[in-house]
Amino acid sequence: MDWPSPVPLSADDEAGTTWQVRRAWPVPTPGDYALEVLTPGEPGVRGARLRQGRFNLIPPDAPKLPALRAEAQKGEVISYRPYRQAVVRATDRYIKVFQPLRAVVPAERCAQVDILLDPGTFTTPRILSRSSDVIVFSSIPGLTLSELGRNGAGVSDEMFAGEWEKWSRAWIAQQHGRYGRVGQSVVESLPLRSPEVESANVWRRVNGWLLHNENVPELAPQGNALRAAAEHVSINLLRTAPDPLVWAHGDLHAKQIIATDGPSPGLLDFDSTARAEAARDLAGLDVHLELDLRQGQMTPARYLTAHTQVLAVAEELQVTPGRFHAYADALWLRVASSPLPGRFSLAMAALEDSLLRSSGPAVMSLTSHNRHLA
């Protein structure tokens, strides 16, 4: 049984227009959520707020994103996290809008990645212009690997497999590359995404879920299941020695990889680039693939094609299997903590499938919680 999420699949505004909820984030105040929504007939996405069940669209002159109104006139808003960040797709470029002064660090990350990526591995967007709250990027022609994997995408299985092979070769070449003195200095300056950081993020997500649902007695079993899972995931992250730290994308999934006409695939979005174990990127990519499979957005055959490539890359890079699974479980727990309807049961089922490969009291505790919820 899934938990009765306070975030609906859709909601009506004051004019009676129905908006589909695409993404949702809890705001620190219990019962308060920021939403990304869309509606048929309207281009792009909008931001909205759900406060104690009351739905309201965020006006175009969005609080904390003062540059968005002007930049949105130049194209279509395709990504919008209220009060934090938005992406506008224009004819030949993408415009990323941040809070005032918050574009400085992402621009620096892009410059650092230009130094770190070996020529011939990946094609990356160029920065066309930048300010303290806006970065304009060149576009990379082609479809993302996520789009190629969608049911009805209209591409052959051979082409799909070929694009994943292209990604795997590029990723291995990049991770096997050697950095010079300048490159090594750049790597050492990147943020550290250690197992301790990952564990803290897991507990932050779980505690956020508990904060928003602590006064709902019927959700106590779900809360207990999340706690049990978080304890086990945290132990797995911290009880064994980590693999060596490498350059990490930080938010790797198939929407960030573009199938190009050339030999080098495209790679997008380096806001989260860091030093981390190679397992973190690869497990994140793999979990997103399985999420698409479990949501019916990818066929089992194409999932198996992509999943096999990810595991082959992990083996080539000598990723310890236990580290791969520890990071994968951490991401599934973050999915389970999402306020979107259906995510809890989907993610907990995937997490239980993973944890049952292990043994120990924490696993038995989690399994008993999940069986109680069934």
Image (cartoon, rainbow, N blue to C red):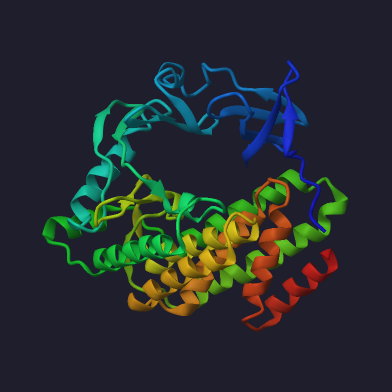
Depth check: 213 or 269 in front? 269
Looking at the image, residue 74 sits to the left or right of residue 175; the answer is: right
Query: Does residue 95 show up?
Result: yes
Depth check: 25 or 166 in front? 166
Residue in the picture at 62% in, 34% down: 35
Quarter residue 131 falls in: top left
- 256, above or below 121, in the image: above
Looking at the image, residue 168 sits to the left or right of residue 302; the answer is: left
Depth check: 109 or 95 in front? 95
Indicate the quadrant containing the C terminus: top left, top right, bottom left or bottom right.
bottom right
- 127, above or below 59, in the image: below
- 66, above or below 345, in the image: above
Quarter residue 247 falls in: bottom left
Looking at the image, residue 179 sits to the left or right of residue 51; the answer is: left
Residue in the picture at 67% in, 79% down: 356
The number of discs equals: 0
Looking at the image, residue 186 sits to the left or right of residue 141; the answer is: left
Depth check: 238 or 163 in front? 163
Q: Tell me residue 212's x, y (percent).
A: 73, 44
Indicate the quadrant containing the N terminus: top left, top right, bottom left or bottom right.
bottom right
Query: Does residue 26 show up?
Result: no
Q: Tell me residue 352's x, y (percent).
A: 68, 71
What is the residue that sits farthest to the bottom in this orientation?
Answer: 359
Q: Tell me residue 353's x, y (percent).
A: 66, 73
Residue in the picture at 69% in, 76% down: 362
Q: Tell me residue 9's x, y (percent).
A: 73, 39
